[in-house]
Amino acid sequence: MRLSRFFLPTLKETPAEAAIVSHRLMLRAGMVRQESAGIYSWLPLGFRVLKKVEQIVREEQNRAGAIEILMPTIQPADLWRESQRYDAYGDEMLRIKDRNGRELLYGPTNEEMVTSIFKSFCRSYKELPKLLYHIQWKFRDERRPRFGVMRGREFLMKDTYSFDLTKEEAMKSYNRMFVAYMNTFARMGLQAFPMRAETGPIGGDLSHEFIILAENGESKVFCHRDLLDLPAPGLDVDFEGDLQPIVDERTALYAATEDVHDEAAFAKIPDDKKVSARGIEVGQVFYFGTKYSEPMKARVSHPQNGEVPVHMGSYGIGVSRIVGGLIEAFNDDAGIIWPRSVAPFDVGILSMRAGDEATDAACEQIYAGLCKAGLEPLYDDSDDRAGAKFSRMDLIGLPDQIIVGPRGLKDGVVEVKDRATGERVNLSPEAAIDQIIARHQRDIF
Ligand code: ATP
Ligand code: MG
């Protein structure tokens, strides 16, 4: 993409309304625009990151055996009356009437709808297990929308729902999602720790939140320090095999959110291993048994016992919240530092003298070479001052920069800068292309 053709409305001033660094940087980098409290337009740069995050989430859901569907944002109120949640959900639910006076709502979550889909088509235990998910906008009329996309009112969520014959089988689905989540966040460069959590309005008796530690996080969490050293299970996990040992290893150490924190259990941890910190909830998994299948009559034939309600779980990831969460995790004074897997472009090409023949030619050569290798460069072909180009490129945080100017080209070199370390090397244009491709291949998995 050439900057001259792109739409990158960066801001010079720090927006006063933004209280935390990720919100400030998202506005300054021209990633989003607020349309109303907690409701955002995603501008091209932000949209590209959102799509990268979404795609990683999708790939790891598919790998774990979940099947993608797409349910609507608008749901009939009657569906929620069946589960008794219509009144219980309270003011967070946006309630709407259509022209015929029919009551609708903008979905805050989809347990009811997916249960209704399941029961219309699945009648036999032979169809189980089933894991269905979608990635769809949700609306929750949050009391305090804040921190930009991290606590929005309209936000993008991946939500999966599992259907099993028994509690034991449901635990296997729970474990699939648990393991998939660890890998999902790791692929984005994030360390997200599973912590025991309250089930809240979703209901049920088993739940973990996945938390990334961050000073500006809204959740207070407590855990054993050794948990922070456990690596993600890895993409070669066999999802058809026994995942229990992996989950056990990651749930053996104390880790809990404030709501379910147990002071007595925490007190037993040696002092130097106690972590009490703030974090951002990027995902949550729930097992809630027959809470919805019972009232909504989602039953299947049992091999021995007639008909039984299915055991269910639900599993959410805050796709749009993660974009803010990533910036909280990866930034410095100059701006954002994207992990390669979620960067809006792979590399920036900065022309130090647009219009100079040798500089233009070298930029074009590098641009074409990177595109040919399947990378997505952003080529700053503008005639802005060098200083403005440097700070803009640092602000938007592409992992690598190639700086091309007449002075270097006289010696046959361009400068390659690593945004994260600030390290710079001079290389020939060909070697610069190879270097960027190699870095990309090293980090993307
Ligand atoms: P919170 O406790 O932060 O209000 P929740 O527990 O109500 O979230 P879930 O129902 O578990 O949310 O939703 C699944 C995921 O969706 C959460 O883990 C979070 O990442 C994301 N999410 C929830 N509410 C919001 C919001 N208002 N804005 C952005 N993302 C959200
Ligand atoms: Mg939650």
Image (tube, rainbow, N blue to C red):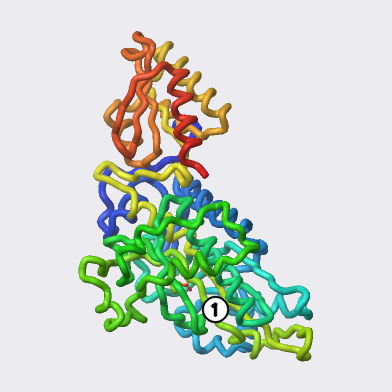
Q: Number of numbered discs present?
A: 1
Report whether 99 appears left or right of 183: right
Which quadrant of the view contains residue 103?
bottom right
For mark 1, does the 10 Å Cα neighbourhood hold few (<14), some (14 to 19), or many (20 or more) residues? many
Q: Looking at the picture, how far across and down is residue 208, in whole percent?
A: 45, 73
Q: Residue at x 72, y 74 (%)?
A: 128
Q: Which residue is mark 1?
A: 287
The residue most toward the left is 271
Q: Quadrant of ligand 2?
A: bottom left
Which quadrant of the view contains residue 118?
bottom right
Q: Residue at x 44, y 26 (%)?
A: 435
Q: Looking at the picture, how far across and down is residue 302, in whole percent?
A: 76, 85
Eyeballing the image, is 65 above or below 256? Answer: above
Report whether 384 appears left or right of 290: left
Q: Residue at x 36, y 45 (%)?
A: 29
Q: Is mark 1 within 8 Å of ligand 1?
A: no
The amino acid marked with disc number 1 is Tyr
Q: Is residue 152 at all visible to an observer of this figure?
A: no
Which quadrant of the view contains residue 243?
bottom right
Q: Looking at the picture, how far across and down is residue 246, in whole percent?
A: 50, 64
Q: Looking at the picture, how far across and down is residue 223, in whole percent?
A: 32, 70
Report whether 254 appears left or right of 301: left
Q: Is residue 296 at all visible to an observer of this figure?
A: yes
Q: Nearer the viewer, residue 86 or 50?
A: 50
The residue most toward the top is 410
Q: Residue at x 47, y 18 (%)?
A: 430
Eyeballing the image, is 412 above or below 222? Answer: above
Element at badge 1?
A: strand
